[in-house]
Image (cartoon, rainbow, N blue to C red):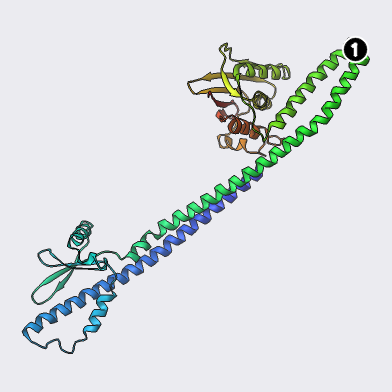
Amino acid sequence: MVDIYKQNNRWKLLLGIAALLIVATSVIYSYYLVRNVAEDEKTKISNYKMALEYMSYTDSLDAIYPGFSAGLDYEMFFSIIAANRAPTIIIDESGETISGNNYGAEKDNDEKFLRERLKIIQRSGAKPMIVKSRYTTQYIFYENSWLLTLLRYYPFIMAFLVVAFVALGYMGFSSSRNAEQSRVWAGMAKETAHQLGTPLSGIIAWLEHLKLMRGEDEETMEIVDEIGKDVVRLELIADRFSKIGSEPELKEENVMAILKDSFDYMKRRAPKRLVFELENETEPKMVSLNKPLFEWVLENLLRNALDASDGKGKISGTVTDDNDYVYIDISDTGKGIPESKFKTIFRPGFSTKKRGWGLGLSLTKRIIESYHSGKIFVKESVVGEGTTFRIRLPKN
């Protein structure tokens, strides 16, 4: 059973690696695109600057030598200027804005907007391009185009989308798997309860028949009484299974009394070398719970403690509380659990026993957390020294 979870973890690892590869590829390719687009925009800005410079220079010479610029291909200069897509602001030597480009029709002529953008560009440390003519000097400040800005943020957007996709896929898969497991468990539990009912009814009938036939034989009656106790226990087990998958009825119960009964029951069936020690607490600890199911939880924990102890050592229980919760700690001095397995042991199918089904702690977790809104976890454990399980139940 453990191999199933190792394989599951491998799939998670492979999924994570695939996501990282996608993100890394996107980042590398985006960097390549950004670098090329940035170089292209820089070239267009340089051409834009030279076109303005040349046109300004020829205009100033036209004032002195009329007709100087006649025959020049102004259409080529205008096409160079139009090819620039980067937002630009042109200022004169006094710092006054002359024009804006590629911010939008309204904003290109909005003096207040252009001044605010100019301050932002200057604070970023950007150096202007200088446009020189015969009589004036102008300065071009420019920003990244909208396309270049999008490309710079593309890797982060892609990373977010990949992580979100993987997370949603994993959550959906886990939710579907858990729902399927719940349906299987509920169906299996109810069918088990149903199957137990028929032979139990037969055993009860045979016990009554024995009482009628051998009622005067004390030895026989003693055996019948013991079998009757086991039948009652089997009826309790069948009742527990029948409650899986349905909403159990919760009642105010004294946790201390239930824990004491469970300790007494297990102590009678444990080796003599194993010491059972329960905190002597006289004050009741009242919690809303379903007694048959909660007894099942305690029985599972105590059986695990018994198996881990190899018939010797000590199993102890304590109950404490605060304003909101009641805490039940069950400890043993057995084999202990590695820290890496603290959560794995509650997964269905996980077992350290050669013949174990790995359902005890999984059902225990389901009963505590799904039916009682509580929490169960390994409070502490040291390999070779022992383990403490903690159950936390809300008072209200």
**Does 125 sit above or below residue 72?**
above
Q: Amino acid at mark 1?
A: Gly
The residue lying at 70 percent from left, 29 percent from top is 240
Residue at image mark 1: 215
The residue lying at 28 percent from left, 68 percent from top is 86
Camera-side residue: 383 or 326? 326
Q: Quadrant of residue 55?
A: bottom left
352 displayed left or right of 113: right
Q: Residue furthest bottom?
A: 71
Q: Residues within 10 Å of mark 1 (few under 14, many from 20)?
A: some
Whether residue 1 can be seen here: no
**Does 22 sit above or below residue 178?**
below
Where does the image place residue 248, in percent across and percent down from the top left? 65, 29
51 displayed left or right of 342: left
172 displayed left or right of 220: left
The residue lying at 12 percent from left, 67 percent from top is 92
